[in-house]
Amino acid sequence: MQIQDNLNHIHQLITQACQQANRLPNSVQLLAVSKTKSIQDIQQAIDAGQRAFGENYVQEGIEKIQYFNTQGVALEWHFIGPLQSNKSRLVAENFDWMQTLDRSKIADRLNQQRPAEKAPLNVLIQINISDENSKSGIQPNKMLALAKHIENLPHLRLRGLMAIPAPTDNIAQQKMALSAMYALFEQLKKALPNQQIDTLSMGMTSDIETAIACGSTMVRIGTAIFGKRHYSAN
């Protein structure tokens, strides 16, 4: 089974990268990025033991969440795409995590719209660490202000930071951006000692090993698990 083999390979990469960085393999969580992928593909990943999935598109993600809810499968769903205000309720009501929070307005809406009977929505602040105009995320110097705003929202639980550094094959450039993210993560933990700040989501197929060496606690892998994406499905 190709997806199972791919997952096994990624877990081996994570283990090796953790060993090289003197870290425990279970200190890095694998998030399978399943956007544009079919129910059948996700089911193969579930059969191979994967439980956490990331979706970029609200409606597509909700269809998958609802399907697997009807199957009685306990999964963890992360929203990892840019979020428009008019779709915040759908994320608040259906997802377990929102990784791309970068505005207090969206934080307020998610807090208001999170159902009271559900656990608080886990959120990550997205940092535009490479200062790219095309990327979502806030500037590093605005992180603490947004974090302290989120701290006062009872239906959100701030868990850490997320970033999508500019793609590059240059290891030195990768390390520069990823190390800067780790420094911000440590700064956030010190600034909010009473919060459960434990998640640094960074690292994808192209930079997984460097991300782990720089302190990532969650890598987001899509292509290396599921193969190339089929955008025509949307």
Image (cartoon, rainbow, N blue to C red):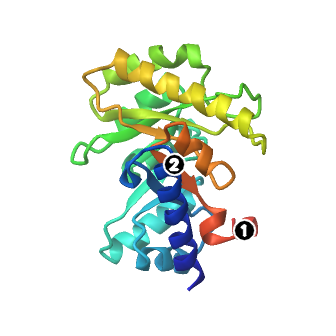
Q: Secondary structure at mark 1?
A: loop
Residue type pointed to by label 1: Lys
Q: Secondary structure at mark 2?
A: helix
Q: Is residue 6 left or right of residue 45?
A: right
**Front-most of 140 and 185?**
185
User: Residue 175: x percent and y percent?
Assistant: 65, 34
Vertical position of residue 36 compared to residue 209: above or below: below
User: Residue 31: x percent and y percent?
Assistant: 49, 56
User: Residue 135: x percent and y percent?
Assistant: 70, 34
Alpha-carbon distance for marks 1 and 2? 29 Å
Q: Is residue 114 left or right of residue 133?
A: left
The quarter of the displayed image where residue 46 is located: bottom left
Residue occupying image coordinates x 41% and y 67%: 66
User: Residue 81: x percent and y percent?
Assistant: 59, 46
* Residue lying furthest left: 117
Vertical position of residue 59 compared to residue 106: above or below: below
Q: Which residue is mark 1?
A: 228
The quarter of the displayed image where residue 34 is located: bottom right
Q: Is residue 120 left or right of residue 147?
A: left
Q: Label 2 crowding class (10 Å Cα cut-off): few <14, some 14-19, many 20+?
A: few
Q: Which residue is mark 2?
A: 20
Q: Is residue 114 left or right of residue 88?
A: left
